[in-house]
Amino acid sequence: MSAGSGIPTRSRAGPFGRHMWSRRWAKDFESGVDRNEVSGGRQDARRGRVVSLDHSGRTVRCDVEGSRPLPFTVEFEFAPIDSTDSDALRRALGDEEQGVVGALTGEFSDTVGFLLLPAVHGDTAYTCRCPVQPGPCRHVMAAAYVMVEWWDVHPEALFALRGLGAEELGVVLGDGAGDDETVSYDVREALWGSDPLLPVIPRPEPAGLEDLLDAPVARRLAAAASADPLEQLRVVADLEDFLEAFSRYGDQ
Ligand SMILES: [Zn+2]
């Protein structure tokens, strides 16, 4: 079998999925599937026989080269996140280290990953246009592996795949916003506003210069300026005056 011209997988051997949650999904997807389809799918994925991956809303579509001149189209459709998980998601997003905006750009914890992850049985539907039905056939398996690696690179895609577009995210995050300021902001603005997507980094109060220049340093500077103890005290006093004036200047 020759190598295809499709999307190369990172994984050259063993399981697919770099994150705990993506690896789990791939493993769950394999469970109960005929071993031939699993190894055929792994081979196809690694040989670049998945030639495209497109997504729209909750749907992912891949073309996979098979035994016919034209590739077979595989389609996955994921169920929208349910209200229990979306409640848990809202709480989890409030605790994220990178903040909500960070999470929306794909910087999220495994906790959020598992909450967003569609269950293989129940939340995941798939079809393939090849004759081997109902499947999952090797084409579906190959597409699934490539999709898992796509999730690894773009975890934020899971929000849309679970039906969490800008408006729905606004509802999920806005719910109960009164008691949690972290999540009460305009999601639409954050996702598609004119400002670049950057994690929210709390701006620390600027440290007073007095804090930066501690007493031993001031004493050393004074000692370097003069051998006379009285003169040294003056130097320290001058330094303190200067720093005080300087920090007042910085406050303006
Ligand atoms: Zn198929």
Image (cartoon, rainbow, N blue to C red):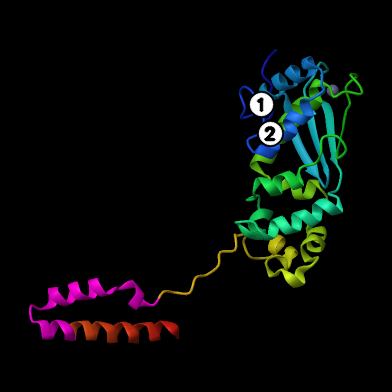
Q: Nearer the viewer, residue 175 or 160?
A: 175
The residue labelled by disc 1 is 15
Check disc 2 and give the amino acid type: Arg
Left or right: 183 in relation to 224: right
Q: Nearer the viewer, residue 135 or 117?
A: 117
Q: Is residue 191 magenta?
A: no
Residue 169, by quadrant, is bottom right
Instruction: State the image coordinates of residue 107 (x, y, percent, origin top left).
Output: 62, 51
Left or right: 35 in relation to 207: right
Rendered view: 56 above or below 145: below
The 10 Å Cα crowd at callout 2, few under 14, some 14 to 19, many 20 or more, is: some
The tag earlier along the polypeptide, 2 or 1, is: 1
Number of numbered labels in the structure image: 2
Check disc 1 and give the amino acid type: Pro
Can residue 164 be seen here? The reply is no
Q: Main secondary structure of the magenta part?
A: helix
Q: Residue at position x 73%, y 46% from top?
A: 157
Q: Residue at position x 13%, y 77% from top?
A: 225
The 10 Å Cα crowd at callout 1, few under 14, some 14 to 19, many 20 or more, is: few
In 3D space, how far apart are the residues under numbered discs 2 and 1 (Cα atoms)? 7 Å
Q: Can you tell me which quadrant of the image ligand 1 is in?
A: top right
The residue labelled by disc 2 is 23
Instruction: State the image coordinates of residue 25 (x, y, percent, origin top left).
Output: 74, 34
Marks 2 and 1 close (CB-CB < 8 Å): yes
At mark 1, the secondary structure is loop
What is the magenta range?
208-234
At mark 2, the secondary structure is helix
